[in-house]
Image: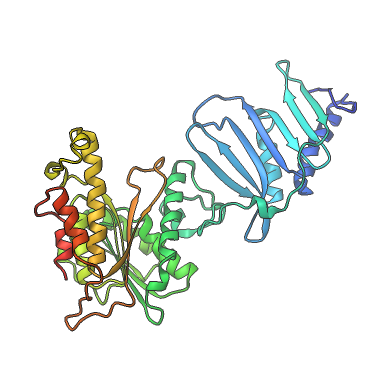
Amino acid sequence: MTIVSEFLPATSFETDSNMVLQLNTIDEAITRQDCLLLVLSNPRKKSEAQPRKITARPVEIQGTPVLQFTNHLSRQETHDNLACEEAVIRVQKLFPREYRDCHLYTPEADFVFREKPDGRIRSKRKPPTKQRTSLDHNRQRAYLIPDGMPCPFLEAIGVMTPAGSVKPTMYRKFRQINRFLELIDDVVGYLPEDRLIRVVDFGCGKSYLTFALRHLFVELRHREVLIQGLDRNEDVVRQCNEVVNRLGYKDLQFQTGHISDHTPTGNVDLAVSLHACDTATDDTLAQAVKWNASVILAVPCCQHELAPQLESQEQAGLLEFGLLRERAAALLTDALRAQALRQCGYQTQVVEFIDLEHTAKNVLIRAMRDMSNIPNDSGQPVIPVPESQYQQLKQHYGLGRIGPDRIVSTV
């Protein structure tokens, strides 16, 4: 393969050996940490599985400089963080074997390598357009579980490769797991500090987030925990226990059963309910309040109970449309649940769980036991807010007996 020179200033590529020498410019820039940006484009294969382009830029992760590769797919982006030696090997495999164009930006110059239809590679050198900046400005988002670092439980449940790279099809789940951990980490201060933390996860399903809970408390926060995952699907529970046995976790247990039949082994400090359908969320919230859980987290799902009941003359223009009625009912249901938890003595927030582009089930109700609220003799808290906030919502929309009533009935 012969290179035709288009360098400015002129530089001659006359032999294959010179071509190799010039292509080594890429390797040397990466090795010397002079690569400010690398862009590979014009892929040989056109498919959804093939990134339309790959970019690489320097970032710093936990104090270590690496080159972050971003695969730009049609519907998502995936990332790999590679040390210099690994980055050189990655680029050698990609260009020119899989991508015909390569742009390299360094402090000294911008380089373009492009394969022409006749198989020759033309190269061009231009004055530099980018300047070196502090890696502080280029840091990867500080995920609690970073991409590019091996994590045993994520490998075991199929999210990561053994080398620590997130699988392209699992990147949305990876982001969801990290977002969940951020929301938990924010309220760790409401959990006991001087003893084992007991957690119950209702309807745990495949338990991606249950395993993530254990990782946060044990591996990142160095706390002692006992986590019980509960689900009615026997096959799912069996699969989760197989992963537990493979990883050797003694502090994580999965059981088949329903929340109404579950008896915890001790005080429940953290109660989690993710994607429980319709009024099942109300059942789990009510049970968590009965147990006087310090923190309650719920991501509701499939909320249909209120829609047929909604009546409001003031909002008749909204409620006459079926789709809007369903959405209004879902929002109202979560508002009633939040107010019910407040009435039961919890500081309650309604926050975004994950971006809507990843899942429509993006509302998380987070409730923390009010530390200043002293329980009465029966073990239940004194009501810290007036009942009217809950009751007024019901009265305004003409609601009768509904699921969230089970929450307020605990006080």
Image coordinates of residue 32 in percent, x first then y, are: 79, 49
Asked which colour scheme the image uses, the reply is rainbow
Q: Is residue 384 left or right of residue 156?
A: left
**Residue 157, position in %: x, y?**
40, 53
At horizontal 26% and vertical 54% (from top left) the residue drawn is 335
Residue 110 in the image: state x and y as whole percent.
79, 34
Q: Quarter of the image containing the N terminus? A: top right
The relative height of residue 208 versus residue 251 in the rendered view (above or below) is above
Instruction: Compare residues 129 and 64 and report the one nearer the observer.
Output: 129
Q: Quadrant of residue 295?
A: bottom left
Question: Is 337 left or right of 34, judged from the image as shown?
Answer: left
| Most distant residue in the front direction | 314
**Is residue 119 at all visible to an observer of this figure?**
yes
Residue 259: tell me if it is visible: no
**Residue 84 or residue 138, whichever sits in front:** 138
Residue 11, x across and y down, in percent:
89, 28
- In the picture provided, is 295 more to the left or to the right than 221? left
The residue located at (59%, 51%) in the rendering is 140
